[in-house]
Image: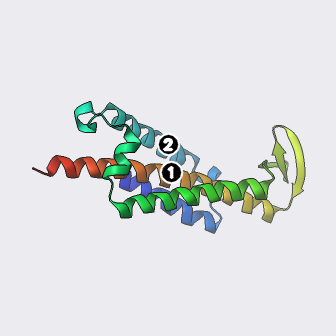
Amino acid sequence: MVCVAGFALSLAFYVASFFSVVVDDVFTILLGLGIVIFVCVAAIYATPKADLNNMFFFQQLNTRTPRTLRRAQLLIFALFLFSFAWFLFRSEASSPTEKNGEYFLNNHGKIGRTLTKTEYMHLKADEFRIFATGFMSAYSVAFGYWTVLAQERSEP
């Protein structure tokens, strides 16, 4: 259930990114999502070897996860990669920064081009989408693992 809640919250953040919500607005919640997914994945690796049937984690997910779920996971991961590439392209591989009411691109301390407030907000929304889709991808994999394991334990 934790994985489903994490995925749902990540999906809500993805949608919210289209309505002017940015990372700075929900940073503590994002930090919490990161800690929870870390715990979910750590629990996967702490699962006794008998439950893993001595198979590597991703091998098990690939062979036992239903095809529909695997395809959904791949689509979500592709969305993450697209969001990341789109942000890199639009931001010129720099970070949108605001200082003293001025907006600009910051590349490791080097000031890039100046941005309008609208450009800045669009880039911050793109940045937020990277986090949201990354968490969606991670939570979908954890959900897939725990779902498969629960089904196998319930079968006679």
In the image, 26: left or right of 55? right
Q: Closer to us: mark 1 or mark 2?
A: 1
Q: Is residue 1 visible from the viewing direction of this image?
A: no
Q: Secondary structure at mark 1?
A: helix
Q: Residue at x 9, y 50 (%)?
A: 156
Q: Residue at x 53, y 47 (%)?
A: 30
Residue 109, x across and y down, in percent: 84, 37
Residue 81, x across and y down, in percent: 61, 55
Colour scheme employed for the rendering of this structure:
rainbow
Q: Residue at x 36, y 61 (%)?
A: 67
Q: Secondary structure at mark 2?
A: helix
Residue 78, x across and y down, in percent: 56, 59
- Count of numbered marks: 2
What amino acid type should be assigned to the residue bearing mark 2? Gly
Q: Is residue 31 visible from the viewing direction of this image?
A: yes
User: Callout 2: few (<14), some (14-19), or many (20+) C-alpha neighbours within 10 Å?
Assistant: some
From this viewpoint, which residue is outermost toward the left? Answer: 156
Say above or below: 73 vs 15: above
In the image, 125: left or right of 108? left
Distance Cα–Cα, label 1 vs label 2: 8 Å
Tell me, for residue 47, which label it has, or none. none
Say above or below: 89 vs 55: below
Which residue carries the number 1 mark?
A: 135
User: Could you say which is closer to the camera, residue 3 or residue 82?
Assistant: 82
- Quarter of the image for residue 65 reads bottom left
What amino acid type should be assigned to the residue bearing mark 1? Phe
Question: Is there CB contact under 8 Å for labels 1 and 2?
Answer: yes
Residue 56, x across and y down, in percent: 37, 37
Which residue carries the number 2 mark?
A: 34
Q: Earlier in the sequence, mark 1 or mark 2?
A: 2
User: Could you say which is closer to the camera, residue 48 or residue 3?
Assistant: 48
